[in-house]
Amino acid sequence: MEGIERICQFLEEAGAYYLGTTEGDQPRVRPFGTVLLYDGRLYIQTGKVKDVSKQIAKNPKVEICAFKDGKWLRIAGVLENDDNRDVKVAMLEKMPSLGRMYSPDDGNMQMLYLKSGKATFSSFTEAPETIEI
Ligand SMILES: Cc1cc2nc3c(=O)[nH]c(=O)nc-3n(C[C@H](O)[C@H](O)[C@H](O)COP(=O)(O)O)c2cc1C
């Protein structure tokens, strides 16, 4: 399995992850759950009206952290907005419950992909493993 696939699978299986952004000199973190592997890219989804979206627009450097079965994953990376409608449709097909809040043409639904970054799998028992994106 390719690195990016392993990362997506880990986030999916963890069920939720934590997304860190910055607002000025203040770190902000919140739970997220959306993950989509599309065209070899890792996408997450949010709403443009949210503070998290505004923070990413100002500073696209983020961290993601998830924990599962004694292993944790930390991604330090840069997110990029993608307004491609097909990606939004694919996200809604994968997670149909999102359709209660979002639609591809609502002007709010936002897809962001990890343009670059470094993902590290860690545990207390094994050496860390880093994947460059
Ligand atoms: C388990 C879980 C998963 C969530 N997944 C997402 C998500 O993928 N995208 C999103 O925009 N909000 C998601 N939320 C809601 C955000 O955490 C919430 O809207 C948060 O307040 C957004 O951050 P902000 O207030 O800094 O804008 C999720 C909440 C929970 C509890």
Image (cartoon, rainbow, N blue to C red):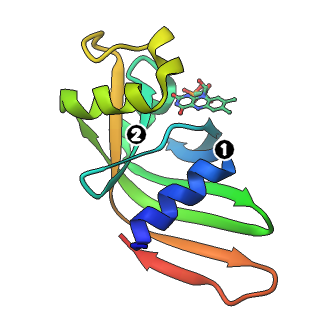
Q: Quadrant of the C terminus?
A: bottom left
Instruction: Tell me the residue that label 2 is attached to.
Output: 56
Q: Residue 41: x and y, percent?
A: 31, 55
Q: Quadrant of residue 15?
A: top right
Q: Residues within 10 Å of mark 1 (few under 14, many from 20)?
A: some
Residue 114 vs residue 102, the one in the foreground? 102
Residue at mark 1: C-beta within 8 A of ligand 1: yes
Instruction: Tell me the residue that label 1 is attached to.
Output: 15
In what quadrant does ligand 1 lie? top right
Q: Is residue 119 left or right of residue 42?
A: right
**Disc on res. 100:** none
The image shows residue 92, relative to residue 15, as above or below, that is above
Picture residue at 58% right of the left edge, 38% below the top: 33
Q: Residue 6: x and y, percent?
A: 49, 66
Disc 1 element:
loop
Q: Residue 118: x and y, percent?
A: 44, 71
Amino acid at dot 2: Ile
Disc 1 versus disc 2: nearer the observer? 1
Picture residue at 80% right of the left edge, 86% below the top: 125
Disc 2 element:
helix
